[in-house]
Amino acid sequence: MKDFRNFNNMVQGDTAPAGTMVKTFMANVFAYMTGALAITGIIAYAFGTSPALLNYLINPETGGMSIFGYVVMFAPLLMVFGMSMAFNRLSSFVLMMLFIVFSILMGMSMSFIFLAYTGSSIASTFAISSGTFGVMALLGYTTNTDLTKFGSILRMALIGIIIAMVVNFFIGSEAIEFIISIAGVLIFTGLTAYDVQKLKRIGSGVEYDTQESSNKLAIMGSLTLYLDFINLFMFLLRFLGDRK
């Protein structure tokens, strides 16, 4: 477990019992994830309901995205790649600081949903997403079924849905968008269970590693589950949300 490749690949072998170290590791993962989601939610609400703050993201003269708005939209994706590639070189403290900055930027970028959807539908969709995520996380943690092959299929399906989204960006078909939304919900619902099981297996080995490495793995694990939840929420919002 000396480089980040093992974070993605350490999914083989027997599943270890849910011992103390596993529970501690998973508790840290969910604590970091919950904290990041709270930051994102607060920032999104603050920007989405404040015209003054939205002016930083939208050019008030043209109505289009400002330069800072474009930075906010694309920086999180670059940060995910950067954190993954520099995993070995960064300390757990630096990774945590980057995760906090990432959560803030994600909150800013997600603030636009408050312009497109009603507040009540956002709240109800968040509740549905939380319940779905919780059930699948519990399933992934408790099941004895190996989800490795299932996860590989979902990863390939995710690539397919990304391609479909790019194509539909130019076509603009509502029917295709609806199908993409349903597929996205199914994919990230399944990935939640798969990723939790993978993290549980990683957690079974952290007792043999250093505390620093364990903290780093927990942070990156929380980032994975954070992205699962956010994508699940956004795909659900696309067909459950009431537009203004």
Image (cartoon, rainbow, N blue to C red):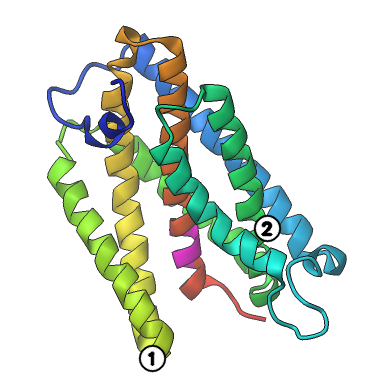
Q: Within 10 Å of the Cα at label 1, are there few (<14), some (14-19), or many (20+) other Cα atoms?
A: few
Q: Is 100 drawn above or below residue 63 in the view shown?
A: above
Q: What SS does tag 2 mark? A: helix
Q: Quadrant of residue 183?
A: bottom left
Amino acid type, label 2: Met
| Res. 110 in view | no
Amino acid type, label 1: Ile
Q: Which residue is drawn at the image coordinates 27% and 63% (left, top)? A: 159
In the rendering, which numbered label is found on residue 103?
Answer: none
Q: Report the quarter where the N terminus lies.
A: top left
Q: Rounded to the nearest whole Å, what is the CA distance between mark 1 and mark 2?
A: 28 Å
Q: Residue 16: x and y, percent?
A: 21, 18
Q: Residue 40: x and y, percent?
A: 64, 49
Q: Is 182 drawn above or below residue 188 in the view shown?
A: below
Q: Quadrant of residue 144?
A: top left
Q: Which residue is mark 2?
A: 108
Q: What SS does tag 1 mark? A: helix
Nearer-N-terminus badge (1/2):
2
Q: Main secondary structure of the magenta part?
A: helix
189 drawn magenta: no
Does 234 sit left or right of 73 as displayed? Answer: left
Residue in the foreground of this view, choosing between 126 and 39 = 39
Q: Which residues are magenta?
A: 232-236
Q: Which residue is mark 1?
A: 171
